[in-house]
Amino acid sequence: MNARQKRTFAEWISFSFSLLIVLALGTFLGARMLEKEKTYFSVEAKALFDDGKRADGKYILPIQVSYPKGRTFAKLTVRVTWMEDEKTTNSQDIELEYLAEKARQTTYLYFSEDPRNLKITVTPLRYTLE
Amino acid sequence: MRHRAEFFPLGIARLLMLIRKNMSRMSEWQNEGKDLLRGIAAGLIFGIPLLYTMEMWWHGLTFSPSRLMLIFSILLCLNTVICLFLGFRERYDFFSAILEAIEAVGLAVILSALVLFLIGELDTGSSTTEIFGKILTQAVVISLGVSIANAKFPKNDENLKSSEDHSQAPAGSSDERQTKEDIMDIGASIAGAVLFAFNVAPTEEVLKISSRLSAEQTLLLLLFEGVICYLILFASGFWKRNVAVKDSVFQKPFAETVICTAVSLVVAGGLIALVGQGDQQSTWYLWVRSTVVLGLPAVTGGAAGRLAL
């Protein structure tokens, strides 16, 4: 086959499909580029007390982190704080490798007491943009 | 009656013309199918082992749109340059190279989307940004594989062994020669599977993928591995083997595909046991799933190994 040989109908069809894919990808990236790049995002982090379970003498509490809209970021740290008694405050940091747009990740924490009585607060601490 | 007599030859001539036209169009589609399959097979051989890299999935997520756009533009330019000299078709002018590069990227996007879906990295809950980002980063290597198909697997390679050519066949009965060929093929599959899967087996990715796949998804992945094996060995036309015993069931494409897939899966299972992470052998079920997951690079390597013979 040489350079001058006419492209066949079948070749044009597969080219058209490929072009559609490439254009879709290019258009999407172009549109995202034109958007003003945001660097500040809010994350929703909460303890799901109603979904907690008791197993083998321990209380397991799901901590849900969700991210409604924005650029994917990496290394999100969420701090879970609770009060064992009136004076003692404990905390546990949870680090998520990355959190994508519309993502929802759940981490499970073990407690020796019923988490409902521990005054638990969940706070996002930091994230990194690459 | 006379009118009818004139009508028939005319009708038959038209019918023949129509058949000829359709036959020519069918042959166009067959040629196009072969070209695309050669591109897909080459893309899979080059891209599959690199798809099992967690950091690459994450880069697709965390890179900014401008950085992804830069990668995308470089990818198209690089493929155009490669297609100018190699490609998966046999046209070497600048305009054809641009068209071929677009096709290579298009094919790579479809393939990487399919593989990412099969290994559970893309699902219905993924956002558009996540889908496009992950697919694009994975499509880079696959598209380069598609674009260099002609370099490694020429379309009309006269040096390839032909199944009809026995002029230089070694001495001995056809059964003996066939046994020797089969042993060589199995050896090549083992070598190829080890080469492709050895460095993937100890990684966390295999455990991560196998832990999240359901039984149905694992089965789907296994079927896909069989299809890839058939595609590389037979559909792409890369492999021309010596068949001494032609009427044997074991020399049929289906049997050869099953044997090559099975041998590669045995290699994958062995590698999981030898160099895999300890957790993967904690239960039989997880070990089997890990074997199927590692089977993807192993089967690709096993089939590619036979091409090297």
Image: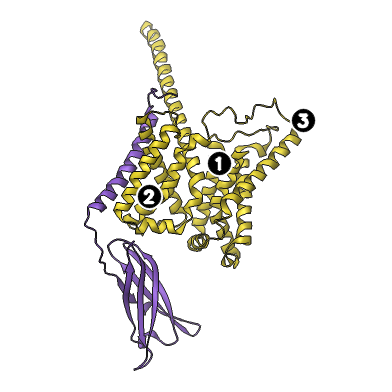
Chain colours: A purple, B yellow
The residue pinned by badge 1 equals B230
| Chain to which mark 3 belongs | B
Relative depth, front residue between B17 and A129: A129
In which quarter of the view is residue B74 placed? top left
Q: Distance between the residues labelled 2 and 3?
A: 52 Å
Name the residue: 43% across, 30% down: B29
Q: Do the residues labelled 1 and 3 touch (CB within 8 Å)?
A: no
Query: What numbered label is drawn on residue B171?
Result: 3
User: Pointer 2: what residue?
Assistant: B136
Secondary structure beneath dot 1 equals helix
Instruction: Name the disc covering residue A97, or none.
Output: none
Dot 1 amino acid type: Tyr
* Same chain letter for marks 1 and 3: yes
Q: Distance between the residues labelled 1 and 3?
A: 30 Å
Tell me, yes or no, if residue B280 can be seen here: yes
Point out the image quarter for the C terminus of chain B. top right
First along the sequence among labels 2 and 1: 2
